[in-house]
């Protein structure tokens, strides 16, 4: 039997990890966020510089829906499940559809009760609501960048809605409040990213 050295084992695992990630349609950063590791650690595993621990291999096998053997053996031709990513996409789209349904329902009811009113505002109100729902989903899934984008959209769209409802010349000043909130979101995202990298 041909003897296999440590570097060959590293290379086999690295090749299988790259194959699994690419077949799942994930970037190294997305995979890192899913597993709560840094993209630097993912890169090292995929280059064969080091091998994940048994615990991490178990995590990876469960995440991809394959056996550990499919990760550590040569010519295993692993076939990952894409269910996890697709389910999250469907949840996001379903949430957006539900919010727009409620906005449309609100528009119809308001138009019926107040024909000369401003029923169209129900659609404007749907925008920060969608951003808020996506912010919550991204926070639960620990998607840092999409969370920062969605929370920023929520802030600016909520202030836009306030301006449209109040319709006052001086109401634009509420946007001054949004600026420090936006800076806080950016700084928190950077801080979380730096902490995440230091821990790994």
Image (cartoon, rainbow, N blue to C red):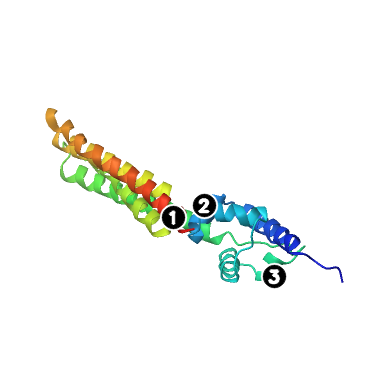
Distance (Cα) linking label 1 and label 2:
14 Å
Label 1 packing within 10 angstroms: few (<14), some (14-19), many (20+): some
Quarter of the figure with the N terminus: bottom right
Residue at x 53%, y 52% (from the top left corner)? 39
Q: Is residue 81 left or right of residue 191?
A: right
Q: Could you say which quadrant of the image residue 52 lies in?
A: bottom right
Circle 3 residue: 69
Q: Could you say which quadrant of the image residue 172 lies in?
A: top left
Among the two numbered marks 3 and 1 on one chain, the one whose residue lies closer to the N terminus: 3
Residue at x 42%, y 53% (from the top left corner)? 92
Residue 153 drawn above or below residue 41: above
Is residue 120 visible in this depiction of the protein?
Answer: no
Label 2 packing within 10 angstroms: few (<14), some (14-19), many (20+): some
Label 2 residue SS = helix
Is residue 106 visible in this depiction of the protein?
Answer: yes
Q: Which sits in the foreground, 57 or 91?
A: 57
Circle 1 residue: 196
Marker disc for residue 30: 2
Q: Position of residue 102 (x, y in %)?
A: 29, 51
Cβ atoms under marks 3 and 1 closer than 8 Å? no
Distance (Cα) linking label 2 and label 3:
24 Å
Residue at x 52%, y 61% (from the top left corner)? 84
Label 1 residue SS = helix
Distance (Cα) linking label 3 and label 1:
29 Å
Q: Which sits in the foreground, 104 or 81?
A: 81
Q: Which sits in the foreground, 108 or 119?
A: 119
Q: Position of residue 72 (x, y in %)?
A: 70, 66
Q: Could you say which quadrant of the image residue 178 lies in?
A: top left
Cβ atoms under marks 1 and 2 closer than 8 Å? no
Name the front one of labels 1 and 2: 1
């Amino acid at each position: 039997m041909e003897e296999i050295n440590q570097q060959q084992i590293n290379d086999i695992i690295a090749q299988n990890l790259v194959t699994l990630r690419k077949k799942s349609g994930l970037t190294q950063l997305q995979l890192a966020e899913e597993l709560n590791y840094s993209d630097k650690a993912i890169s090292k595993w995929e280059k064969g510089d080091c091998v994940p621990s048994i615990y991490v291999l178990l995590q990876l096998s469960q995440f991809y829906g394959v056996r550990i053997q499919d990760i550590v053996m040569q010519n295993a031709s692993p076939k990952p499940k894409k269910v996890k990513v697709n389910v999250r996409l469907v949840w996001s789209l379903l949430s957006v559809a539900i919010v727009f349904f409620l906005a449309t329902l609100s528009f119809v009811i308001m138009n019926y009760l107040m024909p000369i009113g401003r029923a169209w505002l129900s659609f404007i109100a749907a925008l920060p609501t969608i951003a808020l729902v996506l912010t919550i989903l991204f926070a639960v899934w620990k998607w840092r960048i999409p969370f920062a984008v969605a929370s920023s959209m929520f802030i600016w769209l909520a202030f836009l809605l306030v301006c449209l409802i109040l319709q006052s010349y001086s109401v634009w000043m509420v946007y001054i409040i949004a600026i420090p909130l936006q800076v806080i979101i950016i700084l928190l995202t950077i801080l979380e990213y730096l902490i995440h990298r230091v821990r790994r």
